Amino acid sequence: MSAVDRGDAASRWLAFTHPGFTRYWVALLCANFSVQIQTVAVGWQVYDITRDPLDLGLVGLSQFLPSLALVLVTGAVADRFPRKVIITLCIMVEALCAAGLLALTLAGSTDVRLVFAILVLFGTARAFFNPARQSIVSNLVPAAHLPNAITQATTAFHVSTIAGPMLGGLLYGVTPELAYGVSLLLLGTAIGFALSIPRPVQAPSQQSRTWASLVAGFSYIWRAKVLLGAISLDLFAVLLGGAVALLPVYARDILDVGPFGLGMLRAAPGIGALIVGFYLMSNPIRDNAGRTMLVAVALFGVFTAVFAVSELVWLSVLSLFLIGGCDMVSVFVRNTLVQLWTPDALRGRVNAVNQVFVGASNELGAFRAGGTAALLGAVPAVLAGGIGCLAVAALWARAFPALRRIRQLDAPG
């Protein structure tokens, strides 16, 4: 191996030379692993009880609404208070929710309203967790290592997205109680690592608690058209194109693959994202970043449409795999822009707004998919979403020329 090759290999792991980031990464991995197991278990359990695809949409909506309702508060909290403390407390609340779901299952409850109530509390914890966990990365590594740290953190998410659903489906197939119990154990591990993170240096917001300071995240994104274009592109693309919420319907009624097959379907996008993530670690996007993001979103829509009409398990898994790879490219560009183009004192509020957009695309998208499927059926709902995603990519290419022309992802001068 040449010296250049050795340097490229070492550059993949730059973020892990900082102990605080390593502990944060493990905590994030365990927490997301738990969330993925819990998501599979809740989705399957709710659909098994009601057989109504609209309820799958409500599972997502109940977790999104707290982020929307608290967006002006969660970002300000992440900018004003220690982000490590916020992360730790939120994981503790998530553990409480996992314990509640375990208790309901042990009691044999079939009242899905109680499940939705727990998910609202869980969504509230995630509303505070996400701006803090996104913003703290820039406090744990120097700016030169931030793109690598973002890729590593995103890869941790996708590692859990791969193995978590498969394990969740397998555990749920054995017994639902086992799935929720393992989820609770992982959250306990995440709490331990979060507590061990050295207190990072953080530039707290010096603004007074005025309306202007609360909406500063919105104002900054509105002025920075590149950020506005990147964040809103992801919002509308996944809002229309997301098919993950309806995977229990495909697993049970279309592909007939059972709980473990559901885990396999949910893991496929993560596998695609993970492979692309490993590639981006040593081959980051160095030119035409904006156009690359737009093309990735367009392909996301194409592969979503293919998945919608597929009745072959291998083609469905392949389509989801390619969906995940395209999504990883979009996530990498968006997250790098948000972190590098935002001052540290504003990162919490900007990330809170970003998270509302992400939550809208995922959880609200799940509600859109579930509601449309209840009216039209699962296949038309997913197919229409894929076509809509393709249209969004074309519209955003014209509406946000500044995003289309972005070449490098460096912070603006």
Image: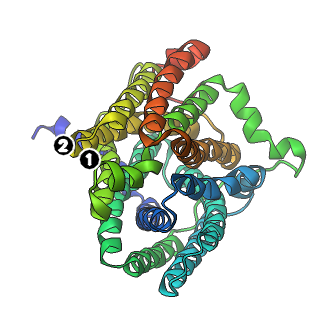
On the rendered image, what quadrant is the N terminus found in?
top left
Q: Name the residue type under label 2.
A: Arg
Query: Disc 1 designates what residue?
Result: 10
* Left or right position of 403 against 219: left
Q: Name the residue type under label 1.
A: Ala
Of all residues, the one furthest to the bottom in this rendering is 107
Instruction: Please tell me whether residue 363 is drawn above or below residue 46 in the rendered image.
Output: above
Residue occupying image coordinates x 29% and y 69%:
170
Instruction: Please tell me whether residue 3 is drawn above or below residue 397 in the rendered image.
Output: below
Disc number for residue 405:
none
Residue 62 in view here: yes
* Left or right position of 402 against 325: right
Asked if labels 2 and 1 touch by Cβ distance under 8 angstroms, the answer is: yes
Report crowding for label 2: few under 14, some 14 to 19, many 20 or more residues within 10 A (C-alpha): few
Secondary structure category for the residue under label 2 = helix
Residue 276 in view here: no
Q: Quadrant of residue 200?
A: bottom right
Q: Nearer the viewer, residue 179 or 203?
A: 179
Disc number for residue 6:
2
| Distance between mark 1 and mark 2 Cα atoms | 6 Å
Where residue 388 appears, x then y in whole percent? 51, 26
